[in-house]
Image (spheres, rainbow, N blue to C red):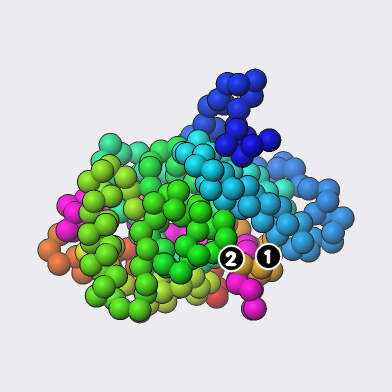
């Protein structure tokens, strides 16, 4: 079936399926497990193969111009179900903080490639958004197609001043159009949260664009970063997956207090979740 037609049945488009209509969600204890995953001795093989298949289908859909909001949710929902089929426990909180008629900047930590795979299922039914990503990622097969479809904002991460100018210019235009922007201020994804590497560019953008900030904290080390290929890391079924979105923050003054507030929010949630890197 053509990827751009994947959510059609008998010529009629299926409605967007929001798996998380409430403020919170916890994977039920009765969630089914994949028999194939068990037969493969709970190795990473089943998850990685299925995850790549979803990723490939999403990229092909984007390449054909069909990756609209409905399809973004459709494929991301598949990733949610895959995680749970492989024994992953997902916990979401603060989703109602995303309900707003005004655009905002979302700022949080970046732990693994899993969060970008799940974000659409979690947030897309409530808001329209895109990401700030490293420019070189646009050349990655399928991922680049997806990010172009989302009109992600590229940065080089070589010159902080140039990156700031790009984010300020393109980010303000994006926010003025009514879309939200997700920033991971860390230089790269890392299981360890290091506040000293968490820059304030998102706070500066929110202040310049006169929009609020939604801080978020996440724990996605269920999927580890691989030693040689970062996207082919181990699966840790004993590590629960957490996403929490905080209350909106208005930037006052130079934004230093708000930047520290975001860091404190992330650190407190990681401590609460028992995260140890």
Residue 108, image x and y in percent? 39, 61
Q: Which mark is residue 271?
A: none
Residue 52, image x and y in percent? 67, 56
Residue 158, image x and y in percent? 35, 79
Q: Are circles 1 and 2 on residues that touch, CB within 8 Å?
A: yes
Q: Residue at x 29, y 70 (%)?
A: 163
Label 2: few (<14), some (14–19) or many (≥20) C-alpha neighbours in 10 Å: many
Q: Residue at x 27, y 56 (%)?
A: 171
Q: Which mark is residue 236?
A: 1
Q: Quadrant of residue 157?
A: bottom left
Residue 82, image x and y in percent? 68, 49
Using residue 103 as the reference point, say whether residue 48 is left or right of it. right
Q: Which residues are magenta?
A: 206-230
Cα separation between marks 1 and 2: 7 Å
Q: Confirm whether residue 244 shows in the render.
A: no
Q: Which residue is mark 2?
A: 221
Using residue 42 as the reference point, say whether residue 26 is left or right of it. left
Q: Count the marks: how many?
A: 2
């Amino acid at each position: 079936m053509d990827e751009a037609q994947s959510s059609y049945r008998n010529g009629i488009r299926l409605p967007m399926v929001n798996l998380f209509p409430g403020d919170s969600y916890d994977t039920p204890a009765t969630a089914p497990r994949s028999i194939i995953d068990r037969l493969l001795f709970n190795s990473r093989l089943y998850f990685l193969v299925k995850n790549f298949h979803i990723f490939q289908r999403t990229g092909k859909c984007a390449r054909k111009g069909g990756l609209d909001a409905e399809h973004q949710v459709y494929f991301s929902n598949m990733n949610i179900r895959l995680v749970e089929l492989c024994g992953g426990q997902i916990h979401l909180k603060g989703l109602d903080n995303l309900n707003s008629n005004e655009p905002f900047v979302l700022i949080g930590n970046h732990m693994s490639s899993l969060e970008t795979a799940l974000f659409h299922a979690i947030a897309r039914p409530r808001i329209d958004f895109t990401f700030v990503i490293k420019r070189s990622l646009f050349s990655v097969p399928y991922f680049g197609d997806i990010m172009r479809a989302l009109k992600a904002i590229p940065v080089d991460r070589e010159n902080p001043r140039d990156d700031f100018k790009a984010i300020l210019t393109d980010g303000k235009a994006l926010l003025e159009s009514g879309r939200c922007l997700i920033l991971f201020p860390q230089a790269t994804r890392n299981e360890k949260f290091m506040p000293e590497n968490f820059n304030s560019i998102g706070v500066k953008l929110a202040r310049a664009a006169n929009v609020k900030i939604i801080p978020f904290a996440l724990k996605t080390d269920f999927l580890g970063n691989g030693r040689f290929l970062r996207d082919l890391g181990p699966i840790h079924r004993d590590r629960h997956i957490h996403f929490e979105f905080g209350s909106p923050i208005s930037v006052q003054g130079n934004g230093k207090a708000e930047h520290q507030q975001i860091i404190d929010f992330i650190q407190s949630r990681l401590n609460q979740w028992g995260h140890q890197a």
